[in-house]
Image (cartoon, rainbow, N blue to C red):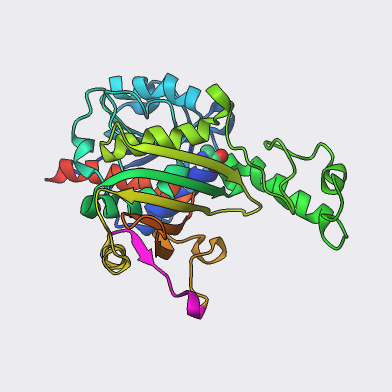
Amino acid sequence: VRPTLAVVGATGAVGTVMLQILSQHADIWGEIRLVASPRSAGRKLTVRGEEVEVVAVSEEAFDGVDIAMFDVPDEVAARWAPVAAAKGAIVVDNSGAFRMDPDVPLVVPEVNPHAARRRPRSIVASPNCATLSMIVAIGALHAEFGLRELIVSSYQAVSGAGRAGIETLRSQLAMVAGTELGTSPGDVRRSVGDETGPFPAPLALNVVPWVGSLREDGWSSEEMKVRDESRKILGLPGLKVTATCVRVPVVTTHSMTVHARFEDEVTVDKAREILATAPGVVLFDDPAEGEFPTPADVVGTDPTWVGRVRRSLDDTAALELFVCGDNLRKGSALNTAQIAELIASEFTA
Ligand code: 2RA
């Protein structure tokens, strides 16, 4: 029997991509039920070429559901995922509500698929999009070389902050287009005024070294997520991780520079061989030909793109990389869908 799937949060930026992915992938599902907040109930969305009416989230909405994919704010997942689990569904949650819960596996199917099988709360979590922009490539290198330390800087797209992020960037770009702005102190800030939307500073013609909320000692929530999630996914509780997360004027696709130090000496040739054959990774790396990943080329694709592979000049056990990944696809909807498909395969095994 084909499992019944619920998509909770189907009307959001990520939910929209989730429906696209469900329509593009092999159809393994029975009924697909679309669940959202009461204000979205009644809307009709298309999935698998059929129009489906959105129902309001409620206990009854989970009757008969085998797997429920959640893409909702943390507090909504915290409230409703246990309800869905109590009704017998296995929840795959894209929010941050349960990622660090020791009874909830944090899963990237290319890296730690086995972890999805132990789920005492019937909840499986999908990582944050910043972590997902690099972890598939890093996981492949770790499997071969044994990772010891990560030092990363992210260049994060505005759609990570949802539709409001996209609208804010587009309106700011319109304000600065055709002007001489970006040449004197504070000129862009004055022009943009309070049109900064979800961001603490203007994004147009700028970069903002802040993503998320303030945590202890000046770290951001995003930087702590990259650190904590990388350790949990790779099963390396003592892994040294330093992240600096920066918002950049890109609509969709996160990028990261990565310094990765391993147990022993590594070679670029071996690293390239691993990356060229790793599932979910595309090696695009020929600077002489101007070939390296950029968000403009990667957006809308599924893989993690890797380029600029170099060995550190001062450490033969370390590599430098540049990675790009679509934060709405592999960074959110695709990874969640892949976990759901992985669990669904248990139904048909
Ligand atoms: C962001 N990773 O980019 C966070 C949440 N999606 O805003």
Residue at figure coordinates x 37%, y 25% from the top left: 81
From the viewer's side, name the closer residue of 345 and 243: 243
Depicted 83 relative to depicted 259: above or below: above
Task: Give the tally of numbered discs.
Answer: 0
Q: Position of residue 48 (x, y in %)?
A: 39, 54
Relative placement, left or right, of 189 versus 331 is right
From the viewer's side, name the closer residue of 59 and 328: 328
Relative placement, left or right, of 23 versus 298 is left
Which image quarter holds the N terminus? Answer: top left
Relative placement, left or right, of 267 versus 150 is left
Residue at figure coordinates x 85%, y 56% from the top left: 183
Which residues are drawn in magenta? 279-289
Q: Position of residue 109 (x, y in %)?
A: 27, 47
Q: Is residue 184 visible?
A: yes
Q: Quadrant of residue 86?
A: top left
Outermost residue toward the front in this view: 314
Depicted 165 relative to depicted 271: above or below: above
Which image quarter holds the C terminus? Answer: top left
Verify whether residue 277 appears in magenta: no
Residue at figure coordinates x 28%, y 32% from the top left: 105
Residue at figure coordinates x 59%, y 26% from the top left: 214
Outermost residue toward the left in this view: 349
Verify whether residue 287 appears in magenta: yes
Q: Position of residue 197 (x, y in %)?
A: 72, 37
Q: Position of residue 110 (x, y in %)?
A: 27, 51
Q: Is residue 11 visible?
A: no
From the viewer's side, name the closer residue of 258 and 313: 313
